[in-house]
Amino acid sequence: MKTRSGEKEKLREKIIDQSIKVIKKKGIHSASVDTIMESLGLTSGALYSHFSGKDDLLALSIEKQINLLTDYLSALIKNDTKEGLRNWIKYYLSEQHVRDTENGCIFAALVSEVALGPQKIKNVFHAGLDKFYSALESGLPSDYKDKRKNVQYIFSTMVGSLSIARTMKSGKDRGDFLENILASVLQVLP
């Protein structure tokens, strides 16, 4: 059965979007082609009519997710440079974000997995991280010194803290931890 090119493109995007949900939940190595495709009611063979393989699909999925996150942050900052960035950081280090792994930050969800993954995925992740740093830098005043160094410090602190918070039992300890990290990160901002 043939599909029209528009339908094929829609299905391709649906597979990309679903794969990111699966890899955020299960990780890169546990998200098999079968798991991704079965979650859409498709056979694993259907993947190969859209992608050259799992690494191709994952690289495209990660790139799309990073671009969406970067565009979202850029829009927040553009609308309100100082408060947009601060509000995003407050959300990032919140209990809500800790619990929402499926819709949460791609960097926190996959950082340790990417380190062990294929070079193609590492390259996409690194390029996306560089682009994301540039978006973060745009939220800092033009005279702010060492922008790249500081956004690397800020964001790595946030990603690591989110990852640690996700290992903690919910409650006062985790809440205090998130509040302490948030206060420390906000102190670095102008």
Image (spheres, rainbow, N blue to C red):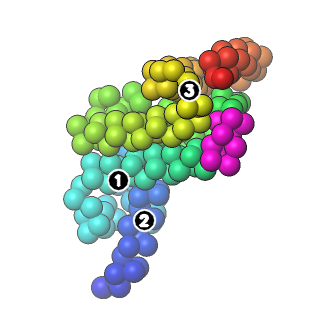
Mark 1 residue type: Leu
Residue drawn at (39%, 36%) of the image: 130
Q: Which residue is mark 1?
A: 60
Residue drawn at (68%, 35%) of the image: 82
Residue 168 colored in magenta in the image: no
Question: Residue 182: x and y, percent?
Answer: 68, 21
Q: Is residue 70 left or right of residue 175?
A: left
Question: Residue 120: x and y, percent?
Answer: 24, 42
Residue drawn at (27%, 48%) of the image: 55
In the image, which residues are magenta?
76-85
- How far separated are the C-alphas under marks 3 and 2? 41 Å
Choose mark 3 or mark 1, whichever is in front. 3
- How far separated are the C-alphas under marks 2 and 1? 10 Å
Choose mark 3 or mark 2, whichever is in front. 3
| Tag shown at residue 184 | none
Question: Residue 45: x and y, percent?
Answer: 27, 65
Q: In the figure, 150 relative to 128: above or below?
A: above
Is the residue under label 2 in contact with that under label 3 (CB below 8 Å)?
A: no
Q: Residues within 10 Å of mark 1 (few under 14, many from 20)?
A: many
| Tag shown at residue 13 | 2
- How far separated are the C-alphas under marks 3 and 1? 36 Å
| Tag shown at residue 143 | 3
Counting the numbered discs, the total is 3
Mark 2 residue type: Glu
Q: Earlier in the sequence, mark 2 or mark 1?
A: 2
Quadrant of residue 31 in the image? top left
